[in-house]
Image: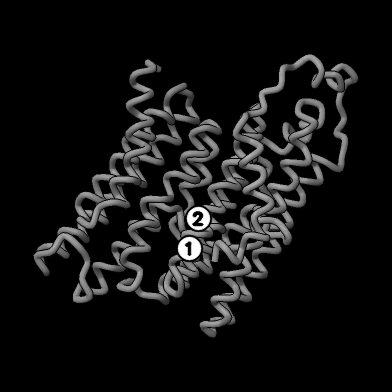
Amino acid sequence: MNPITLIIIYFTILMGPLVTMLSSNLFIMWIGLEMNLLALVPLMTNKPTTRSTEAATKYFLTQATASMILLFSILINFKQLGSWTFQPETSNIIMTMTFISLAIKLGLAPFHSWLPEVAQGVTLTVNLILLTWQKIAPLSIMSQFYELMNPNLLILSATVSVLIGAWNGLNQTQMRKIMAYSSIAHMGWMISILSYNPSLMILNLLIYITMTTSMFVILRAHSFTSITSVSLMWNKMPMATPMMSLILLSTGGLPPLTGFLPKWVIITELTKNSNLMLATVLAMTALINLFFYTRLIYSTSLTTFPTNNNSKMYTHHQPHKMNNIMPPLMITSTMLLPLSPLLL
């Protein structure tokens, strides 16, 4: 792709969530979401294959449907109240439609089925944008208007999301699908706490983005896209093997790593608000998530898969592609738990 075109596309992707976050006008927020959607589709089809074209089509259709529902609810709200923002007087039907549209954009259950399919069809770089940066704009709208949304609907969606993210991640062999189901589960954690304490949702989002970015930086280095290819990491990037293991354990929420912090504070907050049932479900599904991360660690670090003798020397012949951004990402992904009093 033309470098100037790429710069314009990346700038549009960068500006989309910023426009949504910094605006108080619902129509401008919607424009920010559209900037995000329309800029990502050309990136998905940058190197056209049947898989990437299919993924881009699925992405465009689902996101366009969500945008249409959101715009419809914004226009009905304007017609009823004459205001370009949601008010306490806004009807429940409008807020439910808004939540459904944002849930589709985030890949929350039961509107999640597009996310793993799209993630599997695009490159690791586009995956990184799809699973991190693209979540910011819809979550910023939710955090502004969460008081007007039905809390029971939020809790129901969160519960189904963590269950689906955990169970469906169990039988996956492709890294991109594993990360997509991990994303669905993490979104469930964020939505579960939204109606009680939105600042904890923002903390969870920041830590999730850091851990997912660290993971994709390692995967991109040698295009590790399946468990089989990850199992050969020990002779391509020996130093990345323990790093990836720590990041996976942190993503699973194992203490004393950074990923334990959001899970700990969310379960504590839910318990304070007497929502013991949801806290129990979240804790149980966290164990299922941890199981499939541990399975990845087992195939990466604790086993030597059958391989011919020549490939054992691969690490000496290949220049290392480890990124300079990896050390700070690694530290923030694994060692921030002692700072929890400061962060909270």
> In which quadrant of the rendered view does residue 165 lie?
bottom right
Q: Is residue 232 visible?
A: no
Residue 246 on image: x %, y %: 73, 48
In this view, 283 is above or below 234: below
In the image, farthest residue toward the right? 309
Q: Badge 1 is on which residue?
A: 201
SS of the residue under disc 1 = helix
**Quadrant the N terminus occupies:** top left
SS of the residue under disc 2 = helix
Q: Is residue 135 left or right of residue 321?
A: left
> In which quadrant of the rendered view does residue 232 lie?
top right
**Quadrant the C terminus occupies:** bottom right
Kindly identify the residue that appears in the image at 28 percent across and 46 percent down: 19
Viewer-proximal residue among 94 and 200? 200
Number of numbered discs visible in the structure rendering: 2
Q: Dot 1: few (<14), some (14–19), or many (≥20) neighbours within 10 Å? A: many
Identify the disc placed on residue 20: none
Q: Badge 2 is on which residue?
A: 205
In the image, farthest residue toward the front? 342
In the image, farthest residue toward the bottom? 274
Viewer-proximal residue among 85 and 52? 85
Residue 35 on image: x %, y %: 29, 39
Separation of disc 2 and disc 1 at Cα? 6 Å
Residue 204 on image: x %, y %: 53, 59
CB under 8 Å between discs 2 and 1? yes
Q: Is residue 158 left or right of residue 245?
A: left
Q: Is residue 150 left or right of residue 239?
A: left
Specify the amino acid type for callout 1: Met
Residue 119 on image: x %, y %: 52, 40
Specify the amino acid type for callout 2: Leu
